[in-house]
């Protein structure tokens, strides 16, 4: 049939013709003839979700009800002229419909529509068929080959006796071992997207529907096999992806492609409420074990946390970067697990259980090379299984989310996963219709993606060689010169492109330092030092597997910068994570402090530090970077779609930025044998003036300390800050304690003072009482500062001298002090104000200003506000201007947050102003409490 759009002139003629001839035509059927027209030309803009001009044509009732105008009716049975909708189609009323840029009705279709109106605009014969979305016209396609029907959903019963398998239109209930089918449940309108048993195991709900038409959840009685309840039809306008019983059996939650989450009474089917929902399809729902919280995962790239009774949204889990397909809580109700199209598994600690609150991310594990479509938790909460579009199937431990096992690559996409009730087997269903059971062997571990991080620390299992340093002159030879370490070699790179080789012997686990002195002695050499095996091959040091991809989002970085590392998706990164960029490895030290800042990397001040003897380099804006897991040499990590980097024993410029362009390398022998030290110019230069001294020596772990803020002038009743900065040497990373002794009467120092493990700085406050009498210079010289540490089992003590001469300053125009905010703090038995904070928690306190002629605002710094807090505890929510008391005010609330991995600790901290002579508050105590040792341990540095 040749169908042409009707013209305005033709419409007038056609309308006259219809008015004369319609009564003699055959009856027009609403469903067969009119619904297809409404769906094709009207429903895109006039539906229950998008009622343009207030009109919906989605049901016969809404079509006849009309739109916003009370003057015109959309359809008046028997009267074409008064039927406003038909007049717009005939181009006789404004606005003409469909719009000009949209497909237009043909003359034959308009004639059909007009005859239906003339004949009385009869509606559907059955009330249940009222919606125009209730019918779908598709051709029947016969399969060309014999195929198994895919299993699209799967679950074991609570008692472990039965297994439900959802397929297209049916649910099979089998014995748990799969050997016998107990019952086949039928009457479902389409693909079964989920099956779930009721808590008592007597009923089963299946989520199904017809894509683009309707969604329905059907509840079956398992004893009889009969339908006992059906909800969603008429309320859900697209396929349902999930229908879940609440753990107490009282509710049924449904959701699907139409983005709506609905709650029903599970016994009666009475509609309870709609949740505000998502901006995309809702793929998965899950109740927490106490039935108080409902979790949802969506196409909009978020998970959401809902209060079941009130419908209030308690949190939006917005860290994911793509659709989230699965979400659930752990069996103890303490954590949330989700996964989706961004290839990651995420684990949050669930804290928003009774009011809106941010749930902290504990893990964001890059787990697969493609989207994660399925996950399942064992009933004891120990294991997590994931399946991906890359056909990989993996087993993870919880709550640390570490890879335990790689199962064989799957022959087809996994459509559903389920752990056996006793947790000993993992049942896998695939799109090819096959089922397979895999034993869960928790002892079969594979280090790799998600595996344990490896950190070089001072107490590593290495031995320090003994022996006296021997000095030798380089002897020209065609091969490697044999030396006996420890040794110091004087040499030169005689010609461009030349390299020098020195053979030395080491035993497994021995640690040697290879250190070059060239630039320090005015040489032209820009050295590169390497350790090779006896055959001249590079010796692998560590394996880095990227687990999170990112890039630099603001400015490039020179080779010295240690702050403002702005990188994409930084909220999924954690302090002490290793960041790899173009051959350099740094370690994250401090979070970004607002929208205009980035990470600080170790050591947190001054020039940045490279790890594994990688040399800091300039990094370009937009250049890729990766959070990496650090694995032992020789590791073969499971692929996850991100790069794997293998670092070797080599160094260009000293990674700690102390030797300029000179090289320093720490080598731990992986086995007994001979090794080659190779030295060259990194540019390939050589010739006159390219001399060097290479030392192959035993490590000398040690430290030195500098004291900042000596000779302070302190006002009565006030305090001044003293800083202690450590210079660590040759791998010493342990804590350093500092004692200030023999202070005169009326003066106190906050104590104890400790530079934490792997940190380089600590602060203290020297305070003068209101009536303190300033001693003479000789008295101040009696004050002693002593630093102590344990280095490789040996106690080391260092005398740091005195504080200089402390002078009495004029009465301060400004005094600052820290106070509790409500019940957030308490005075301990020793009289020190103490704040308790859990890892992952945020608490508040007050800072007050006593003004005596100083009326300006009082600033306490930005990322450096909160002095001497434990590493990982920081002053939060500081904004662009930092922590401050505005002008004219006397107090300000401030917040402190502890990162999820922070270990139990007690530490004194204070605030320091940037005004009125940099007054310091009194020192107060913060005590870190870890609520979940297992989770905290998994995130500790």
Image (cartoon, rainbow, N blue to C red):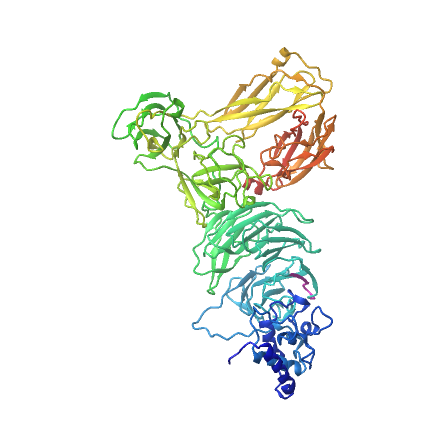
The answer, for residue 271, to whether it is visible in the render is yes
The spot of residue 531 in percent (x, y) is 36, 33
The spot of residue 340 in percent (x, y) is 53, 54
Observer-nearest of 691 and 2: 2
The image quarter in which residue 43 lies: bottom right
Residue at the extreme left: 478
Residues in magenta, as a range: 261-268
Residue depicted at x 55% and y 41%: 574
Q: Is residue 845 left or right of residue 800?
A: right
Residue depicted at x 51% and y 49%: 396
Observer-nearest of 390 and 452: 390
The image quarter in which residue 297 lies: bottom right
Residue 265 inside the magenta-drawn segment: yes
Please say if 781 is above or below 668. Answer: above
The answer, for residue 751, to whether it is visible in the render is no
Residue 420 inside the magenta-drawn segment: no
* Main SS class of the magenta portion in the image: strand
Please say if 546 is above or below 136. Answer: above
Observer-nearest of 807 and 510: 807
Residue at the extreme bottom: 24
């Amino acid at each position: 049939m040749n169908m042409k759009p009707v013209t305005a002139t033709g419409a007038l003629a056609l309308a006259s013709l219809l008015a004369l001839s319609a009564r003699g035509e055959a009856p027009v059927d609403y469903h067969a003839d009119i619904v297809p027209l409404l769906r094709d030309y009207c429903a895109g803009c006039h539906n229950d979700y998008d009622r343009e001009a207030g009109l919906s044509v989605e049901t016969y009732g809404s079509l006849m009800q009309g739109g916003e105008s009370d003057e015109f009716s959309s359809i008046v049975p028997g009267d074409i002229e008064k039927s406003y909708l038909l007049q717009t189609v005939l181009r006789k009323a404004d606005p003409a419909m469909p719009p000009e840029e949209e497909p237009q009705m043909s003359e034959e279709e308009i004639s059909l529509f007009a005859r239906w109106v003339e004949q009385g605009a009869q509606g559907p014969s059955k009330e249940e068929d009222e919606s125009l979305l209730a019918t779908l016209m598709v051709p029947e396609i016969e399969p060309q080959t014999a195929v198994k029907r895919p299993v699209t959903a799967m679950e074991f019963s609570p008692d472990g006796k039965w297994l439900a398998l959802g397929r297209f239109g049916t649910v099979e209930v089998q014995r748990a071992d799969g050997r016998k089918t107990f019952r086949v449940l039928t009457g479902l309108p389409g693909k079964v997207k989920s099956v779930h048993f009721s808590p008592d195991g007597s009923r089963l709900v299946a989520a199904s529907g017809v894509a683009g038409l309707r969604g329905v959840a059907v509840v079956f009685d398992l004893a009889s096999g009969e339908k006992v309840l059906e909800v969603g039809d008429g309320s859900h306008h697209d396929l349902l992806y999930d229908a879940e019983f609440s753990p107490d059996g009282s509710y049924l939650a449904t959701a699907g492609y139409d983005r709506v989450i609905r709650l029903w009474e599970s016994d009666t089917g009475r509609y309870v409420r709609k949740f505000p929902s998502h901006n995309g399809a809702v793929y998965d729902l899950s109740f927490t074990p106490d039935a108080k919280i409902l979790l949802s995962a969506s196409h909009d790239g978020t998970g959401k946390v809902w209060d079941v009774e009130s419908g209030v949204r308690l949190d939006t889990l917005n860290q994911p970067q793509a659709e989230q397909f699965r979400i659930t809580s752990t069996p103890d109700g303490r954590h949330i697990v989700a996964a989706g199209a961004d290839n990651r598994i995420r684990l949050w600690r669930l804290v928003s259980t009774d009011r809106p609150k941010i749930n902290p991310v504990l893990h964001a594990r890059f787990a697969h090379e493609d989207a994660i479509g399925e996950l399942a938790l064992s009933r004891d909460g120990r294991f997590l299984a994931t399946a991906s579009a890359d056909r990989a199937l993996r087993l993870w431990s919880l709550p640390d989310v570490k890879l335990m096992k790689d199962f064989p690559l799957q022959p087809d996409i996994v459509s559903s996963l389920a752990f056996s009730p006793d947790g000993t087997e993992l049942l896998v269903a695939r799109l090819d219709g096959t089922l397979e059971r895999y034993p869960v062997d928790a002892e079969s571990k594979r280090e790799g993606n998600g595996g344990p991080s490896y950190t070089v620390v001072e107490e590593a299992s290495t031995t320090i060689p003994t022996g006296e340093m021997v000095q030798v002159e380089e002897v020209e030879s065609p091969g490697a010169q044999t030396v006996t370490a420890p040794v110091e070699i004087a040499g030169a790179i005689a010609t461009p492109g030349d390299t020098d080789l020195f053979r030395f012997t080491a035993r497994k686990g021995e640690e040697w330092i290879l250190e070059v002195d060239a630039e320090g002695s005015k040489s032209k050499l820009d050295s590169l030092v390497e350790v090779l095996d006896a055959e001249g091959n590079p010796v692998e040091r560590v394996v880095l597997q990227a687990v999170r991809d990112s890039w630099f989002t603001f400015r490039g970085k020179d080779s010295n910068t240690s702050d403002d590392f702005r990188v994409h998706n930084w909220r999924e990164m954690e302090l002490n994570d290793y960041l790899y960029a173009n051959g350099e490895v740094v370690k994250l030290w401090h979070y970004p402090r607002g929208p205009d800042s980035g990470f600080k990397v170790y050591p947190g001040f001054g020039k940045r530090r490279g790890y594994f003897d990688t040399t800091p380099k300039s990094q370009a804006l937009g250049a890729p970077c990766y959070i990496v897991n650090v694995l032992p040499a020789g590791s073969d990590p499971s692929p996850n779609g991100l790069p794997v980097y293998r670092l070797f024993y080599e160094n260009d410029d000293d990674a700690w930025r102390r030797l300029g362009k000179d090289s320093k390398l720490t080598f731990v022998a992986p086995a007994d044998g001979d090794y080659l030290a190779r030295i060259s110019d990194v540019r390939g230069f050589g010739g006159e003036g390219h001399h060097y001294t290479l030392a192959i020596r035993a490590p000398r772990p040690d430290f030195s300390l500098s004291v900042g803020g000596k000779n302070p002038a302190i006002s009565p009743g006030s305090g001044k800050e003293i800083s202690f900065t450590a210079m660590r040497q040759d791998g010493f990373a342990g804590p350093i304690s500092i004692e200030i002794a023999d202070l005169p009467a009326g003066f106190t120092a906050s104590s104890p003072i400790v530079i934490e493990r792997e940190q380089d700085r600590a602060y203290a406050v020297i305070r003068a009482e209101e009536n303190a009498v300033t001693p003479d210079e000789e008295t101040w010289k009696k004050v002693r500062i002593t630093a102590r540490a344990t280095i490789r089992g040996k106690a080391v003590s260092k005398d740091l001298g005195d504080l200089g001469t402390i002078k009495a300053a004029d009465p301060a125009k400004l005094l600052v002090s820290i106070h509790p905010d409500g019940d957030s703090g308490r005075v301990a038995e020793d009289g020190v104000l103490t704040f308790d904070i859990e890892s992952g928690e945020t608490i508040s306190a007050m800072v007050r200003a006593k003004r005596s002629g100083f009326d300006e605002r009082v600033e306490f710094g930005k990322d450096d506000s909160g002095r001497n807090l434990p590493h990982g505890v920081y002053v939060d929510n500081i904004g662009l201007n930092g922590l401050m008391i505005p002008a004219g005010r006397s107090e300000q609330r401030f917040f402190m947050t502890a990162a999820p991995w922070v270990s139990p600790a007690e530490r004194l901290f204070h605030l320091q102003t940037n005004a009125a002579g940099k007054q310091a508050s009194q020192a107060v105590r913060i005590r870190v409490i870890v609520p979940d040792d297992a989770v905290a341990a998994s995130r500790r540095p």
